[in-house]
Amino acid sequence: MTEKMLKFVKVGKQTPNKRKVDRRLDDFNEIYDQYINDKAKEQSSRCSQCGVPFCQIHCPLHNNIPDWLKLSAEGRFKEASELAHSTNNMPEICGRICPQDRLCEGNCVIEQSGHGTVTIGSIEKYITDNAWEKGWINPIKLTNEIDQSIGIIGAGPAGLACAEELRKLGYKITIYDRYDRPGGLLIYGIPNFKLEKFVVERRTDLLKKSGIKFVQNIEIGRNKSLEELKDQHDAILIATGVYKAREIDLPGNNLKNIFPAMDFLTASNRKGLGDKVEKFDDGTLNVENKNVVVIGGGDTAMDCVRTAVRQNAKSVKCLYRRDRENMPGSAREVYNAEEEGVEFIWLSNPKKFVGSEKVSSVLVEKMKLGKSDSSGRKKPEPVDNSNFEIKADIAIKALGFDPENLPRLFKYPQLIVSEWGTIKINMSTMETNIKGVFAAGDIVRGASLVVWAIRDGREAAASIHKYLKLKLIDKTKAA
Ligand SMILES: Cc1cc2nc3c(=O)[nH]c(=O)nc-3n(C[C@H](O)[C@H](O)[C@H](O)COP(=O)(O)OP(=O)(O)OC[C@H]3O[C@@H](n4cnc5c(N)ncnc54)[C@H](O)[C@@H]3O)c2cc1C
Ligand code: SF4
């Protein structure tokens, strides 16, 4: 039994392979390794205060990691939390779900010297969870509200971070979102075992208590036009994320029980939130006792396979057309998934969904890696006469996301987008080609990370503030 599995047993949870009985959806949780005060102090004191803070440089928010580690090592957790919040709007969320191995921790000098990284993410999470528990995190209290308003489209991390920063400055903020709950992919994309939903709700409730107005169940473009929003507010932020699932056009695509990743993950997340989810309850999107095949090699695919394991699937297989080394998803996630019993079928390319009414198997051909393409990645090529079938009661397509056609959706053809459909902005002001309309997060970068969305949201807030100050000066002069 591996050390990680032993930890499951120690905290009274079942090992992944023995989790047959009485399991709720969120019964075992990624975040089982809870820090206590002493452990956080001990870990923080491992920081060598090396002088060249590579961790800080490689954190997209440039969090002042060495300083909050020092404060934590000294037991000054309140100050550590304040410092963590000075650069990050949701440190406990980043602490849980940032790919630290590629960012701060991967660049820790202690890690580089072979002694194991300081567990920056877990400490960041501890500092902030502890601050919530102690009542140190409170709603924004304004003494003076500015008579200018900003309309934000999208309540994901980019929109929320921007809203909080602007509210601190005194602006009136309304966030519009087409989902019934705020949080974007934090609430309906990322599974509960990586990010518990109460953690997201705690943040959005705080923003509500800070006077930020949330309008849910409203789709800009369909229920309200961008033009109307522009008339209503002094500035606009578009932070709509990317939601168009990439398709794989295979024979048999129209068979039943083939789903896009987000359908599967959203149903599971809604269930975890206590919603009635018909398609889960009637077994359509519930994979208990089923053979599951997930197509794709990114982090969304990893979330699908690991969610399937937690739903007690009979078998979970992941098809990816390159090999392990060339997989886009995080190595840590692959490791976790394998440990939980997921079978990776590397160098495999689906050719056909087989079945009469419902999918019953996936026809797959073997691949080998050929010459490198223009990006330097080796191109997968089919191996002759190598087809084989994999049994599937359900197939989940997790091939990534593209932006929706926003100029068309918003009925605003003047909005300039890139050839990939992401919104083009002036990189130093985050402003789109439309005056007073800014954009941030995945809709600008393409599918990315929460920590980058937060950074964009904060930068957009700073630019919107500058823009609105000038607008006010112009208005005053004109009057
Ligand atoms: C399954 C999955 C797992 C992931 N796991 C991780 C992870 O572990 N770590 C990590 O760092 N990143 C992860 N990511 C990526 C991360 O979630 C995103 O990069 C991040 O959420 C982007 O933030 P955003 O605010 O730009 O957009 P989103 O979080 O997508 O929020 C956009 C919001 O805009 C709303 N919206 C869209 N169009 C409209 C409209 N027309 N009108 C009104 N509202 C609209 C949506 O409803 C949504 O609430 C994951 C992504 C997925 C899909
Ligand atoms: S925000 Fe992410 S990258 Fe930055 S310190 Fe926290 S966990 Fe590391």
Image (cartoon, helix red, strand yellow):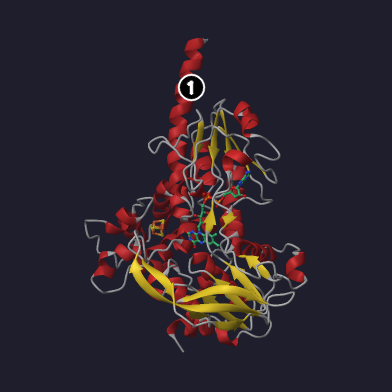
Residue 154: image location, x then y, percent: 58, 45
In this picture, residue 81 sits left or right of residue 42? right
**Residue at mark 1: C-beta within 8 A of ligand 1:** no
User: Nearest the camera: 352 or 216?
Assistant: 352
Q: In the image, is residue 315 above or below residue 328?
A: below
Q: Residue at the location (44% across, 86% down)?
A: 2
**Counting other residues with Cα less than 10 Å from the Cα at mark 1, is it few (<14), some (14-19), or many (20 or more)?**
some
User: Nearest the camera: 25 or 257?
Assistant: 257
Q: Is residue 447 visible?
A: yes
Secondary structure of residue under mark 1: helix
- Occupied quadrant, residue 259: bottom right
User: Nearest the camera: 431 or 132?
Assistant: 431
Which residue lies under the disc numbered 1? 471
Q: Is residue 211 visible?
A: no
Residue 260: image location, x then y, percent: 62, 64
User: Nearest the camera: 84 or 29?
Assistant: 29
- Occupied quadrant, residue 462: top left
Residue 170: image location, x then y, percent: 52, 32
